[in-house]
Amino acid sequence: MSDSARKKQRSSLRISDATNTNPSTLYTDPVTPYRRATSAGAATPGSRSIRTPGTARTPRGGPATRPISRRAAPTTPHAIRALRERADAARTPGRVRRRSGRVQRETPRDILRDLSRVLARDTRPTEPSPLIPSRPSRHSALDLPDLEDGPEPVAPRLSIPLGDMYDDDDSIHEAPPRQSILPNLPDDADNGTIQSLEFGRRALSEDPRLMYGGRLSERFADLSELGMDGDEIEVDGIFVNRRRTINPEDILDQVPEEDMDETTTQMMLTGRRGGRPSDVDLGVFGEMEDETEEPTFRFTIPPRMQATIPRGDEEMGAGDAMDETILEEEEGEQEQEQEDEEQTYAGAEMNQDETAGLVIDNDTDQQLGWESDPEPNPDEDADLQAYREEISAIDRSLQTQSPERTPAQKRIGRQRRALNVSRFGLEYPSVPTATVKMLAAGFAKSQGSKAKISKDTLEALVQTSDFFFEQVGEDLAAYAQHAGRKVIEESDVVALMKRYVSLSYRYFTTTIDVVHPFTHTYANCTFFSPHT
Amino acid sequence: MPKSMYPRPTFKKILKAQSNRAISKDVDILVFLKYTLFMQALLDEARIETKKAGGSSGGGGGAAGGAITARSVRKVREGVLRKFKG
């Protein structure tokens, strides 16, 4: 800053103090802000240190032309007149309206306006050239006159019709957001701050039960809605339709433990598709597969059959009929939603369900009283009749633990472990318990807790592992299909791994021991973690 | 080590049945690696849950600092499964 400018500022400040109690300057310096801050509020009009065009004529010469000394008041008439003129200009009432001079120098808008003033003289606004329809290059004989010039097509309606608001297939928008869980208290209740207490909600879109749509093992809620109270059986001619509520295999697995308490347990049990040991392979029922090739299934769930309904299935054999009963309930659980289009699929899956249902027969015939033997039992009709008068065997087995059901009987015809059936109708063994136990014990020990894994914990872990492999298989199949392959390759698993890393990398922080599957040596795998 | 920790045919069968597709050569091993990570995460969460249950109620079946309970496993497995969803 030059010395003259500083001098100018000081002197003008003093002068404006004398004239109109203005603390700021009239003469503005490059460092001095041109305008007061808006927080300065109601200042005197002179505080707006604006050089209007009128004040632009104020003498602004160099220090040689300024008669004002540093300390003294202006004495010369020229200086006095100049100061008065300046003060008058500051008090000009229309000064606020004439801000253009100041603004023009300040804001980019005014720079643009300057530019526009320069440009507007010699530019013309762009006229859009009329759109010439392009001549199609096809043969002139094909030019039909005015093909496109028909009536204006109706503009598509972009809104959702009102009918969709009510028949909603997507259950996400169905339920309104849950209100707070506060109880309804009377207004005069002394509840303190409880009215303002709001617990956390979870969005329906983030509900973990809805996150795994399409996967059977997560449809806990739907399946548990079937209820635990009673099955429906209908005998229509030779067909027995029965609605199943509990997977018998799960019940059998669950019988030795008393840990049936949790609702989550129930949900998991009902949601899980049963393991069916298909390693029982009786030849007689292999023959029956052929005669049940006809579409003998109907998946409608009628009310429970009572004992008065006449039965016409004597020639089919009660064992076979009950096979179909179990079979129907196996299928009926799966196919309730998709009855019609899945008929052929069910028929294809029936063959292996045949043997599966047979083993369930073996498991349940102690209570039911009918035999699953190939040769028809003479008294099985009466027993079957008696069975149908009762509540269903599955629920009964859930309610009462019959004393004759020993674990030895439970494992009839079963060698090693249960065989589950995947969504595709393929049987698969459950995750080996030894592997799960070893892994779990190792992790539990490395995490600091006891390495002992109790039996029910192990069972829960095995079940979770089944779910995990179901999920992984589905994901890998989706990845492979997306890549256009029929074979799942390593790259799919790598993609899955990468996805996992991006989801949760904090589990990579620890070191785990992995046994190499071939060499049986311990490999110490430490994974990369961005946190460590 | 009495038996193989990784019964490979079994895991191959499981994977093949669940995906209904052919499996390339070493896919099952990679999946098993992922499975170990899953188990680690699951047990980690279950241990935390067990500690929480044991600390709060005391009667929740979880001895404080003790073994992991089945209840906690069932409680946390949904979240962990979702975390491992591809």
Image: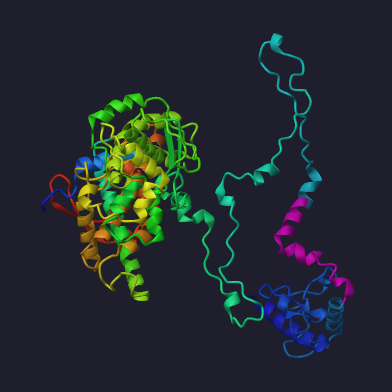
Colour scheme employed for the rendering of this structure: rainbow
Q: Which quadrant of the structure image shows residue A19?
A: bottom right
Residue depicted at x 74% and y 14%: A144
| Residue at the limit of the structure toward the right, as seen here | A93
> Which residue is drawn at the image coordinates 73% and 24% (left, top)?
A133
* Camera-side residue of A503 and A280: A280
**Image quarter of residue A380:** top left
Where does the C terminus of chain A fall, quadrant-wise? Answer: bottom left
Instruction: Let me know if residue A295 appears in the view.
Output: yes
Question: In this view of the protein, can residue A508 be seen by the observer?
Answer: no
Residue A134 lies, in percent from the top left, at 71, 22
Q: Is residue A262 magenta?
A: no
Tally of numbered tags: 0
Q: Residue furthest bottom?
A: A72
What are the residue bounds of the magenta stretch? A92-116
Of residues A458 and A314, which is closer to you in this image? A314
The quadrant holding residue A158 is top right
The residue located at (45%, 55%) in the rendering is A208
- Dominant secondary structure of the residues highlighted in magenta in the image: helix
In the image, residue A100 above or below residue B11: below
The percent position of residue A311, horizontal first and vertical second, equals 43, 33
The residue located at (68%, 18%) in the rendering is A136
The N terminus of chain A, quarter of image: bottom right
Does the segment drawn in magenta span residue A110?
yes
Quick one: which residue is furthest to the left in this view?
Answer: B2
Is residue A532 or residue A271 the one in the foreground?
A271
- Residue A461 x, y percent position in the rendering: 29, 56
- Position of A247 compared to A103: left or right? left
- Asked if residue A242 lies left or right of residue A109, the reply is left
Position of residue A114 relative to residue A192, above or below, is: above
Give the image location of residue B37, x and y in percent: 29, 54
